[in-house]
Amino acid sequence: DEADVALKPGNLSMEEAASIPLVGLTAWQALVERAKLKKGQKVFIQAGSGGVGTFAIQLAKHLGATIATTASAASAGLVKGLGADIVVDYRKDDFEKVLSGYDVVLNSQDAKTLEKLLNVLKPGGKLISISGPPDPEFAREKGLNVVLRLVLRLLSRGIRAKAKRRGVTFSFLFMWAQGKQLSKIASLIESGAIRPVVDRIFPFEATNEALAYVETGRAKGKVVIKVR
């Protein structure tokens, strides 16, 4: 559908452009649409050296936020260069003991970290998860049947209740295609406000190797497969 696409930024290669839509729209919909992140607010973005993380840090910096993230010591320079103000070495420190008073948290890790993330937020803060669990609002947006709505309500009941007790909110985000948002992202890229972070480009014949590399968790930014 033409409403779901946008013109490629003129300053990107095809490979760089291919790395943008998923991570760009995810970050945009989380920080701009859902969180309504404003200048001067504090945002904690997990896994700053990952695909979503590298884009979200740059977007948050463009929006004027103060940014904290988690990364290894080897990736600290990368995320600081993208705009992170505070980098927590997840191999040495527990982020929930270091960070507090944040307006927004973007979760991209497993469910084990969700409750810890609630402690990072200030009252009225927002925890947005792109890795689950799905919540009732997601079920309504997707028009799911009554049974599935009930299942999703149960899946997220625990974290939603804990969030409510702390005076914060939890929501699940599942990225959707949106051409107008992509066009705004393209404009930011062309202006130099955001740049793609591509770790490696594999030929199509090495797809299995590319997937194996992603599974190692060592990729910084995106891994791209070149079809031809």
Image (cartoon, rainbow, N blue to C red):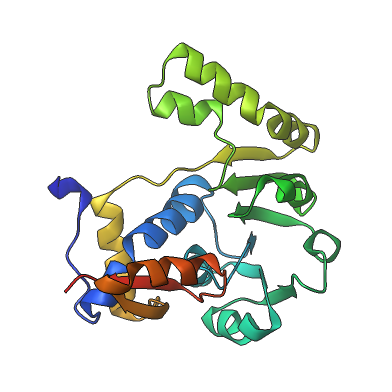
As drawn, which residue projects farthest toward the top?
146
Q: Is residue 60 visible?
A: no
Left or right of 173 in this view: 94: right
As drawn, which residue projects farthest toward the left?
2
The C terminus: image quadrant: bottom left
The percent position of residue 91, horizontal first and vertical second, equals 77, 72
Q: In which quarter of the image is residue 164?
A: top right
Left or right of 31 in this view: 159: right
The percent position of residue 143, horizontal first and vertical second, equals 38, 22
Q: In which quarter of the image is residue 94?
A: bottom right
Q: In which quarter of the image is residue 86?
A: bottom right
The percent position of residue 195, horizontal first and vertical second, equals 38, 78
Left or right of 200 in this view: 102: right
As drawn, which residue projects farthest toward the right?
97
Using the image as rendered, state which of residue 104 and residue 52 is in the foreground: 52
Residue at x 53% of width, y 72% of height: 61
Left or right of 159 in this view: 54: left
Q: Is residue 4 visible?
A: yes
The number of callouts visible is 0
Q: Is residue 127 above or below residue 166?
A: below
The N terminus: image quadrant: top left
Using the image as rendered, state which of residue 101 and residue 154 is in the foreground: 154
The percent position of residue 181, horizontal first and vertical second, equals 31, 55
Q: Is residue 162 above or below residue 88?
A: above
Residue at x 58% of width, y 79% of height: 79
Residue at x 51% of width, y 19% of height: 149
